Image: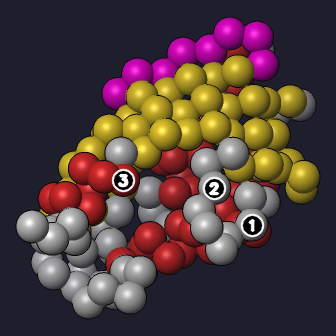
């Protein structure tokens, strides 16, 4: 079961998020999926997750996750990631800068019956904004 859940999370990043195939989230996530890594103005639902990543993909067309560590216990899968992208599109009302970012992220997933039910995540937004020159100074 642990291998199946770990493969599920690898598919989440490798088959859905990295290539921008957000329609696959319907198969990977439960209908009542809950995302605890909320972004203001976007609902913490499966459809909200699609909206969040479509927005990121528009601002960062090469937006990608690299799984550095992944392990599981019980119904939880933990992952440590490197996240990177190039600001080649408008993002949060900011015009493209062409600048790149590379930051760390961690996530914990709860799974049930071969699907992701919940997600908790921490993404280093401050480092990202700093690398993009969006913090002023």
- Left or right of 91 in this view: 35: right
Q: Residue at x 66, y 62 (%)?
A: 49
Q: How many marks?
A: 3
Q: Residue furthest front?
A: 137
> On the image, which quarter does residue 40 sit in?
bottom right
Sequence-wise, the earlier of marks 2 and 1 is 2
Relative depth, front residue between 114 and 81: 81
Marks 3 and 2, how far apart at CA: 13 Å
Marks 2 and 1, how far apart at CA: 7 Å
Q: Quarter of the image for the N terminus: give it.
A: top right
Numbered range of the magenta stretch: 66-75
Q: Residue at x 22, y 85 (%)?
A: 96
Q: Compared with residue 98, is residue 36 higher up or lower down, i.e. above or below? A: above
User: Mark 2 sits on what residue?
Assistant: 38
Marks 3 and 1, how far apart at CA: 19 Å
Q: Residues within 10 Å of mark 2 (few under 14, many from 20)?
A: some
Q: Secondary structure at mark 2?
A: loop
Q: Residue at x 40, y 38 (%)?
A: 105
Q: Is residue 133 magenta?
A: no
Sequence-wise, the earlier of marks 3 and 2 is 2
Decide whether the magenta segment is chiefly helix, strand or loop: strand
Q: Compared with residue 59, is residue 125 higher up or lower down, i.e. above or below? A: above
Q: Residue furthest left?
A: 137
Where residue 124 sits: x, y (%)? 36, 45
Q: Residue at x 36, y 53 (%)?
A: 125
> On the image, which quarter does residue 42 sit in?
bottom right
Q: Quarter of the image for the C terminus: give it.
A: bottom left
User: Mark 3 sits on what residue?
Assistant: 125
Where residue 94 sits: x, y (%)? 30, 86
> On the image, which quarter does residue 23 sit in?
bottom right
Relative depth, front residue between 84 and 92: 92
């Amino acid at each position: 079961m642990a291998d199946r859940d770990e493969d599920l999370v690898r598919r989440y990043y490798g088959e859905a998020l990295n290539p921008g195939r957000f329609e696959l989230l319907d198969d990977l996530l439960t209908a009542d999926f809950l995302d605890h890594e909320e972004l203001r103005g976007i609902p913490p639902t499966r459809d909200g997750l699609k909206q969040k990543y479509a927005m990121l993909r528009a601002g960062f067309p090469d937006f990608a996750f690299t799984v550095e560590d992944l392990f599981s216990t019980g119904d939880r899968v933990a992952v440590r990631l490197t996240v990177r992208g190039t600001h080649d599109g408008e993002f949060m009302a900011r015009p493209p800068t062409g600048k790149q970012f590379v930051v760390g992220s961690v996530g914990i997933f709860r799974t049930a019956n071969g699907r992701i039910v919940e997600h908790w995540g921490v993404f280093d937004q401050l480092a990202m904004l700093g690398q993009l020159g969006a913090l002023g100074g």
